[in-house]
Amino acid sequence: MEYRKLGKTNLDVSVICLGTMTWGEQNTFEEGYEQMDYAVDQGVNFFDTAELYPIPPKPDTQGKTEECIGNWFKKTGQREKIILASKVAGRAPMNWLRGEWTLLDRENIESAIDASLSRLQTDYIDVYQLHWPDRRMSMFGADGLGYKHYEAETIPILETLKVLSDLVKAGKIRYVGVSNETPWGVHEYIRLSETKSLPKIQTIQNPYSLLNRTYEIGLAEMSYRENIGLLAYSPLGFGVLTGKYLNDMPSKSRLGLFGEWFTRYSNQKCRNATSKYFAVAKKYNMSLCQMALAFVNTRPFVTSNIIGATTMAQLKENIKSIDTELTDEMMGKINLIHINNPNPAP
Ligand SMILES: NC(=O)c1ccc[n+]([C@@H]2O[C@H](COP(=O)([O-])OP(=O)(O)OC[C@H]3O[C@@H](n4cnc5c(N)ncnc54)[C@H](OP(=O)(O)O)[C@@H]3O)[C@@H](O)[C@H]2O)c1
């Protein structure tokens, strides 16, 4: 396993981060425990979760994933070995989680952290992330590549950051991260942390894969210059970048089971680009999955690649991507496909 520094902290995290959002829905707790055992055995020391998981979010399953991780900590006594990232939900009308809306205000965050700590059976979370912003904006690919501006009521970022600062002081969280953020949002967090002596964000968790390289447009430079590494999520575009949906719709798969929920990577442009990447992988005797994950692992602005798996075979293949190298010749071919088929799943 390879390790990289997390932002400006003294933490070294594995390049492969274990994603968890299927545990408690597509995967049982037992399967979650088995994934954690195997990943740790392979040198993975970084787990990513959220108060909202498992996905798809539902009132009767919410919190199950953190519960699964908490049970594993208790069972194995390995809490101290793991760098744990979790998230508080941003603004959404989820009246089944906390009040009518979840918001990034003091009341919501203080209630969210205590519930997460209790489910996780721990006293602290290493990286506490804001799952998505409080301000209204295009998210999860909703408006494609276009920018749509919304003027709407929002919790000021300063308020959110002050609450997080208090949580750091209380020892409940060590570091702060954002997710599904834009260059403006990242800049605003940095500006406020510098001018008001508040915690600096250390990570940004955004989508990044061969089907979505929008991070490179405005945020990759931020990662370099501000030392805020990317925690890349959905590196396989929900599994599309294994090629398994090219000719078939496997019934026991994310899109087979929850196709109506997960539409981001299902359009024709994604299919076209995927078949082109598939041909490159084949030419170099590599699986498309290996090539797609190695692409993310080797980008210099990436701190960690958050993989997801629903079977042990998938988990093994995905962790093994750490040993895959992409030659300059392969990268040339990959970049050419990208230029001609840019960001089909923004
Ligand atoms: N911050 C956010 O808003 C956000 C959003 C999404 C994800 N995340 C984080 O990122 C993690 C990973 O995201 P993701 O699950 O969307 O990642 P992904 O790599 O794009 O998709 C993973 C899914 O693809 C399929 N798959 C994985 N490896 C495979 C293989 N070797 N062969 C065939 N199919 C394979 C599996 O689904 P099936 O077996 O069901 O097909 C698996 O659940 C999550 O667990 C979560 O921690 C964060």
Image (cartoon, rainbow, N blue to C red):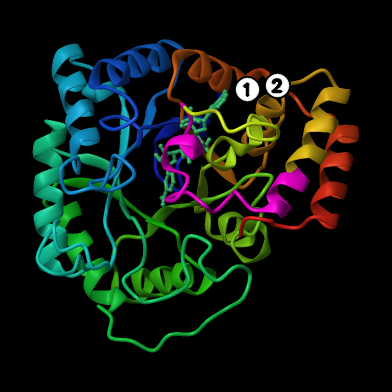
| CA distance for labels 1 and 2 | 5 Å
* Nearer to the camera, 94 or 245: 245
Residue occupying the far bottom of the picture: 151
Q: Is residue 279 above or below residue 158?
A: above
Tag 2: residue type?
Thr
Residue at 86 percent of width and 33 percent of height: 330
Residue stretch rendered in magenta on the structure: 252-273
Residue 271 is one of the magenta-drawn residues: yes
Left or right for 82, reference 233: left
Tag 1: residue type?
Ser
* Nearer to the camera, 246 or 293: 246
- Which image quadrant is residue 240 in? top right
Q: Where residue 59 sits: x, y (%)?
A: 17, 49
Disc number for residue 240: none
Whether residue 14 is visible to the viewer of this picture, yes or no, is: no
Whether the residues at callouts 1 and 2 have beta carbons within 8 Å, the answer is yes
Give the crowd class for mark 1: few <14, some 14-19, many >=20 residues within 10 Å: many
**Mark 2, secondary structure of its residue:** loop
Disc number for residue 321: 1
